[in-house]
Image: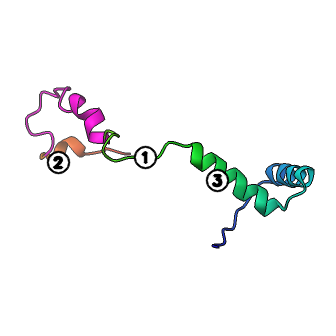
Amino acid sequence: MSTLTLQLNDSLFARLLAASQARNVAPAELARETLDRNLAAAPAASDDDSPSAYDLLKDGFGCVDSGLGDLSTNRKYMEGFGR
């Protein structure tokens, strides 16, 4: 079994202790059960069904015309940018 260290705020830690005492189990056991239950319910990410960021945004690429043919190569357009 692997070990995982968590940092919990005081409120969450108190809730974990109270729930573990109410169920008469160790806090670590309750945390394992909760993680197992929640991870089993979460849908697994699959690469073949999920669209990439490119797929989601590709229709918008190039949709704004700056009117400047050399915008990406002419340094004068970047002067003062980010200041």
Left or right? Give the position of 50 relative to 69. right
Q: Which residue is mark 3?
A: 36
**Camera-side mark, 1 or 2:** 1
Give the extent of the magenta segment: 52-72
Quarter of the image for the C terminus: give it. Answer: top left
Q: Which residue is mark 2?
A: 75
The amino acid on which the numbered mark 3 sits, given as a three-letter code, is Asp
Of the image marks 3 and 2, the number of the one nearer the N terminus:
3
- Asked if the magenta segment contains residue 58, the reply would be yes
Q: Position of residue 72 (x, y in %)?
A: 15, 43
Tell me if residue 14 comes above or below residue 66 in the rendering.
below
- Asked if the magenta segment contains residue 10, the reply would be no
CA–CA distance between discs 1 and 2?
Answer: 41 Å
Left or right? Give the position of 10 relative to 31. right
Left or right? Give the position of 29 relative to 81. right
- Considering the whole magenta stretch, tell me its main secondary structure: loop
Tell me if residue 34 comes above or below residue 63 in the rendering.
below
Question: Image point 78% across, 56% down: which residue?
Answer: 30
Q: Are marks 1 and 2 in contact (CB under 8 Å)?
A: no
Q: Nearer the viewer, residue 80 or 1?
A: 1
CA–CA distance between discs 3 and 2?
Answer: 54 Å
The amino acid on which the numbered mark 1 sits, given as a three-letter code, is Ala
Tell me if residue 22 comes above or below residue 61 in the rendering.
below
Q: Residues within 10 Å of mark 3 (few under 14, many from 20)?
A: few
Which quarter of the picture shows residue 74? Answer: top left
Of the image marks 1 and 2, the number of the one nearer the N terminus:
1
Q: Which residue is mark 1?
A: 45
